[in-house]
Image (cartoon, rainbow, N blue to C red):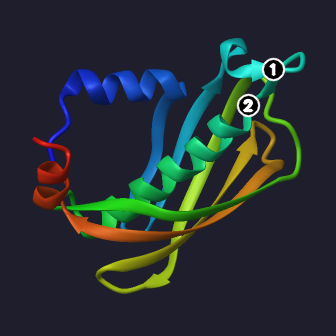
Amino acid sequence: MTDSPAAIAGLHDTLGQQRIIRMEPGDAAIEYRVGLHMCHSGGVAQGGFVAGWIDAAMAHAIMAKFGFDMVPMTLELKISYFAPANPGLVVAEAWIEGGGKSTVFAEGRLCDGNGKVLAKASSTIKMLPAAKVAAMAGG
């Protein structure tokens, strides 16, 4: 599956991605900027963004290990929220806990600029060939 540069940039912009801090086989960290447009209740990031940030870091950790010929498809995502993510910079970190070639188990967390853990997540991820994903999407 090949996403257009515009689509990838659009997703990165929507999530507020600033930079990839680390992308090594089975391990990744991405910095995001929480904007007021992502918030409710006086400056608290909507939980879907928090889940998306950690999910994206998990995908990067997996792609760094398996390459881009396989696409990580989230089957299940469990997230626990500990503290609000407020406007400013946050870092999503993720790593592979185990699995094989077709199913991967990943974990991750979101931290604020001081290293305080705001949320943790675990996920079950199915690996599919990129060509199959493209065919399913009609591409």
The foreground one among 112 and 59 is: 59
- The image shows residue 35 at horizontal and vertical percentages of 67, 17
Q: What amino acid is at disc 2?
A: Gln
The foreground one among 74 and 69 is: 74
Corner quadrant of residue 12: top left
Disc 1, disc 2: CB below 8 Å? yes
Query: Where is mark 1, residue-wise?
Result: 40
Q: Is residue 43 left or right of residue 91?
A: right
- The image shows residue 8 at horizontal and vertical percentages of 30, 30
Q: Is residue 15 left or right of residue 109?
A: left
Which numbered disc, 1 or 2, marks the residue that appears first in the sequence? Answer: 1
Q: Is residue 127 left or right of residue 32?
A: left
- The image shows residue 71 at horizontal and vertical percentages of 27, 59
- Looking at the rendered structure, the secondary structure element under dot 2 is loop
Q: Residues within 10 Å of mark 2 (few under 14, many from 20)?
A: some
Asked if 107 appears above or below 99 in the picture, the reply is: above
Asked if 48 appears above or below 68 in the picture, the reply is: above
Name the mark on residue 46.
2
Q: Residue at x 48, y 47 (%)?
A: 56
Asked if 138 appears above or below 42 in the picture, the reply is: below
Q: Residues within 10 Å of mark 1 (few under 14, many from 20)?
A: few
The foreground one among 39 and 116 is: 39
Q: Residue at x 15, y 42 (%)?
A: 2
- Looking at the rendered structure, the secondary structure element under dot 1 is strand
Asked if 30 appears above or below 78 in the picture, the reply is: above
